[in-house]
Amino acid sequence: MSSLSLPAQFPTRAVSSTKKKVTKLTLWPLVAATFFMVSGGTYGTEDIIHGAGYGMGILLLLVTPLIWSLPTTFMIGELSSALPEEGGYYAWVRRGLGNIWGFQEAWLSLVASIFDMAIYPTLFVAYLTRLVPWFAVGHRGVMVGLGVVIACALMNIAGIRVVATTSLWLFFLLSVPFVLIILMAPMKMGALAGAAASPSASDVGLVGGLLICMWNYMGWDNASTIAAEVKRPQKTYPRAMLVAVVIVAATYVLPFAAMWLTGAPANSFATGSWADLAGMLGGLVGGPVLGQVMRVGLVLGGMMSAFGMFNALVMSYSRLPLAMAQDGMLPRVFGKLQTRTRAPWVAILVLASGWALCLGLGFERLVTLDVLLYGTSLVLEFVALIALRIKEPDLQRPFRVPGGKWGAILVGVCPVLLLGFSVVHGEGEQILGMSGLTFGAILIAAGFVAYAAMRAMRSSDWLSSALKNARKAA
């Protein structure tokens, strides 16, 4: 770190023991991990096509990455190449805007994870019960979800390479059924025109489709928290971000374009309908056996998607408490590392325990709340980009946002406007008897209370230490 005027209550980060020579991620494992931190595949985009239709839905899926993802990846590319530190976006904001905002950046991400991470084991179980209904009885599903949490925690303790390599293989495996759909669709053009429409209603239009698109393209900065464990991050991160944008967009658009060729009605799409539509297409091309194989493959793909997303995000989130502990913003115990793999095992176990406690509470995707919390943290990152350009113009930046000074300012305009629009549009969503916007504002305000409490606790610790030393001296 350069010599910044950081408040005395929180010391600058000591040299981390993660500098010890360990296996680091290269380009493609990082791309795969980013894929799962952001997307996890085509699953979750069905409602866009259901409500907006093929043409408008595909247009949204193509335009959104240009005005939402690409500016974000440019910002991440510059900051991650200039400051490839443990904690990623938390470290950027702390350096650019100071301790209090760095704390808020981490707070927003960890609080948002409470409403997000418990969903993935639940989705895993939902797909599993389509194959084996036995798991839907009693508490069996919760136990399976707990097994997913434990398995991912152990894999993360085993090391970043294990998680990234697993992500790479899961990406290939879950992509196989969709590749088959893309290849088979031209053989049966118009053959699914009579496919039964989903009984569920959807009023998703241009605005609703845009919100769902934004949600499905969120999370690019999650990969930044592991920068200290990436090989040549100055070059690897910008490349990985741009490659991942193209791959994610392709996995969303190409399968829908293929199904459009088959004539399957747009309103036949609903959450989980990919398995049924793939089974129909496979049956037409290769008979009942291929149809059943396609159906099972899509269900297994959904399970792999949920598992891969949870696994990759454990890796991302666990580096926040580690970096904060190194900076003195959390107790030192969160900075403990596994001897061989250098994984932050205490942070992993504590976070995994918290997410496990949320299993079975029936959280649904709260898009408004997710976008509000994530969006606030993203705005802080764009502000940090500008602040660092002003405060540290000589900071080495192997990758820069194109356009010089004005490029750094303008790159955040479209994402910030979209965030503001989405939050205002979703104000009517109710959570615990209040609007999602109000509930989110309370959570944001709680971050400042937590920061004040942490400072008070540290001041008390230093006072106790000072009194103890004074007594010894006397």
Image (cartoon, rainbow, N blue to C red):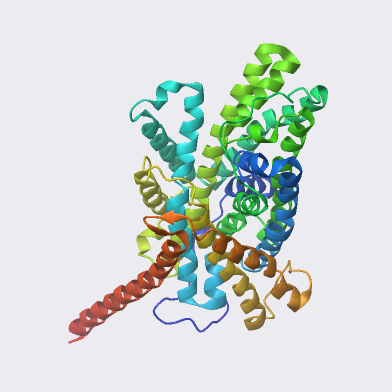
Residue 133 seen in the figure: yes
Is residue 424 positioned above or below 405 on the image?
A: above
> In the rendered view, does 457 fall on the left or right side of 165?
left
List x then y, in percent, for residue 204: 62, 47
Q: Nearer the viewer, residue 288 or 437?
A: 437
Q: Nearer the viewer, residue 350 or 327?
A: 350
Residue under the image location 67 percent in, 33 percent down: 175
Residue under the image location 69 percent in, 80 percent down: 394
List x then y, in percent, for residue 119: 46, 43
Q: Nearer the viewer, residue 148 or 291?
A: 291
List x then y, in percent, for residue 86: 53, 62
Count of residue discs: 0
Q: Image quadrant of residue 4?
A: bottom right
> In the rendered view, does 178 fall on the left or right side of 5?
right
> In the rendered view, does 399 fall on the left or right side of 159?
right
Residue under the image location 63 percent in, 67 percent down: 416
> In the rendered view, does 290 fall on the left or right side of 158?
right
* Quadrant the N terminus occupies: bottom right
* Quadrant the C terminus occupies: bottom left
Q: Nearer the viewer, residue 292 or 389?
A: 292
List x then y, in percent, for residue 235: 72, 59
